[in-house]
Image (cartoon, rainbow, N blue to C red):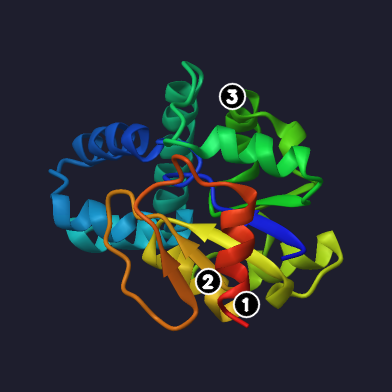
Amino acid sequence: MRAVLWDMDGTLVDSEKLWDVSMHELYARLGGVLTPEVRESTVGGSAGSVMATVYSDLGLEPDPVAMAESADWLHDRTGELFEAGLPWRPGARELLDALLGAGVPMALVTNTRRVLTENALKSIGRHYFSVSVCGDEVENAKPAPDLYVRASELLGFAPAECLAVEDSVTGTTAAEAAGCPVLVVPNDVAVPRSPRRRHIESLSGATVADLRAVYAGFA
């Protein structure tokens, strides 16, 4: 395990609860009601994929300009919610501290746009990450592998040398497609099992040695 590649929303911080708020408000603006099933389908998605889901669900004309405006509003509103600070997922901060102390390089790999990610890093702490790669900085966001491929390249390692930590189906699919073994820490959405995934209930109490053992188990 040469490096650890971290998803952000739902994995490091419990920001999906804030996305819940802004998504419900967006639906109200567009004249609809967000169902739990549709909300679940958008977890971990990119701006483009989320808007495609929203407009299809509401039966709205998929006008690119209108969809872009809605995406901008959603990110601006979520940014306002982020300003109050982001709640950590159990054990996440402690594990970041341990990895940093052990000299393990880390990257933040998120579908969230750069502007909003920079906002989030004020709460999380940018000093943990050697690099960060955002959904609006690659041709194809998660579930495509581009983000994880780019992050590993920037760190100077092959994807197979990096352990990805994810909470969503979308993110886990992306990491797996890039060639990363994946540690899955489910939050609100169940993630199916596969040979390249290991599941744990929580990061609480997890150590650097635990991550190395998980990675070694894929050999």
Q: Position of residue 158 (x, y in %)?
A: 77, 75
Q: Amino acid at mark 3?
A: Ser
In the rendered image, which residue does mark 1 sit on? 178
The disc, 1 or 3, on the residue closer to the chain's N-terminal end is: 3
Does the CB distance between marks 2 and 1 fall below 8 Å? yes
- Mark 1: give few (<14), some (14-19) or many (20+) Cα within 10 Å: many
Q: Residues within 10 Å of mark 2 (few under 14, many from 20)?
A: many
Quarter where residue 116 is shown = top right
Task: Give amino acid for label 1.
Answer: Ala
Q: Which mark is residue 123?
A: 3
Which quarter of the figure is the N terminus placed in? bottom right
Direction top: furthest residue? 84
Residue carrying label 2:
174
Where does residue 10 sit, x and y in percent of width and height?
42, 45
The residue sitting at the right extreme is: 156
Q: How many marks?
A: 3
Residue 122 in view in this figure:
yes
Asked which quadrant contains residue 161, the reply is: bottom right
